[in-house]
Image (tube, helix red, strand yellow):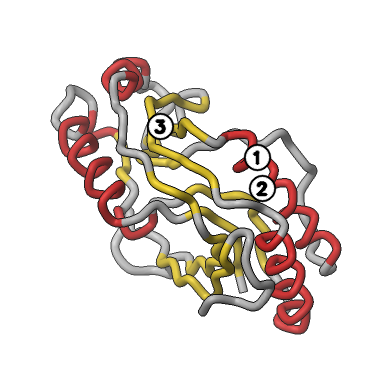
Amino acid sequence: MRLFAAVLPPPAQLDELGREVDRLVRLPGADLLRWTSRPGWHFTLAFMGEVDEELLPDLRARLGRAAHRTAPFPLRLHGGGHFGRAVLWTGAAGGLDEMRLLAERADAAARRAGVAMDEHRRYQAHLTVARSRTHALDLRPFVTDLDAFEGSRWEVAELALVRSRLPGGGPPGKQPRYETIATWPLGGAAEPAR
């Protein structure tokens, strides 16, 4: 199964971002972007790709320990940016050092559980809101509008393990489906919260 570790913003913060994205989709050129769906908005901490089910018990235990060793931290959705001409995202402000540490711990947990991970890179907190359908589109006007975006603060209190189901067939532009399969409280017990 295709898995990643993530921080999932609460519904109120997702609603704030939704109102901002609703504004962005009215900008010139917005129809050249494929906007991500709100149920899929998350901060990926460690992307694991395809994981054998036999690794899941050890992976769960190790992610639980990573969450237990990390204290809750404040976060808010903030500003925006882009990766080349392909990805438009909103960022985060607040406990970025703590989030980076949680990402490193989730990555290490997966590696120690035997998950074949890509090369380790420095973590940059971002939540993808759109992908370009063409590399000819300049994303800077969208980033300029996102620069003023300031979401309200929340306390990140759990680490989530999420399953991603990629669309197979169906209409073009169909979004992946995400299913949270386990969560662990930060700074709490090493057992999954659900």
Looking at the image, is 158 positioned above or below residue 104?
below
Q: Looking at the picture, does residue 103 appear above or below residue 61?
A: above
Residue at 26 percent across and 20 percent down: it is 145
Where does the image place residue 167, in percent across and percent down from the top left?
Answer: 42, 66
Residue highlighted by disc 3: 88
Quarter of the figure with residue 117: bottom right
Q: Quadrant of the N terminus?
A: bottom right
Q: Residues within 10 Å of mark 3 (few under 14, many from 20)?
A: many
The residue singled out by tag 1 in the image is 100
Q: Is residue 62 left or right of residue 172?
A: right
Please, what is the three-letter code of the amino acid marked with disc 1?
Arg
Residue neighbourhood size for the residue with mark 2, other residues' Cα within 10 Å, grouped as few (<14), some (14–19), many (≥20): many
113 left or right, relative to 103: right
Which type of secondary structure does the marked residue at label 1 adopt? helix
Looking at the image, residue 17 sits to the left or right of residue 112; the answer is left
Between marks 1 and 2, how big is the CA–CA gap?
Answer: 5 Å
* Residue type marked 2: Ala
**Nearer-N-terminus badge (2/3):** 3
Q: Secondary structure at mark 3?
A: strand
Q: Position of residue 20 (x, y in %)?
A: 22, 35
Residue type of the residue flagged with mark 3: Leu
Determine whether 76 is above or below 38 in the image: above
Whether tag 1 and tag 2 are in contact, CB under 8 A, the answer is: yes
Q: Tell me which residue sits at (76%, 68%) in the image.
A: 62
Looking at the image, which residue is at 68% across and 63% down? 68
- To which residue does mark 2 refer? 103
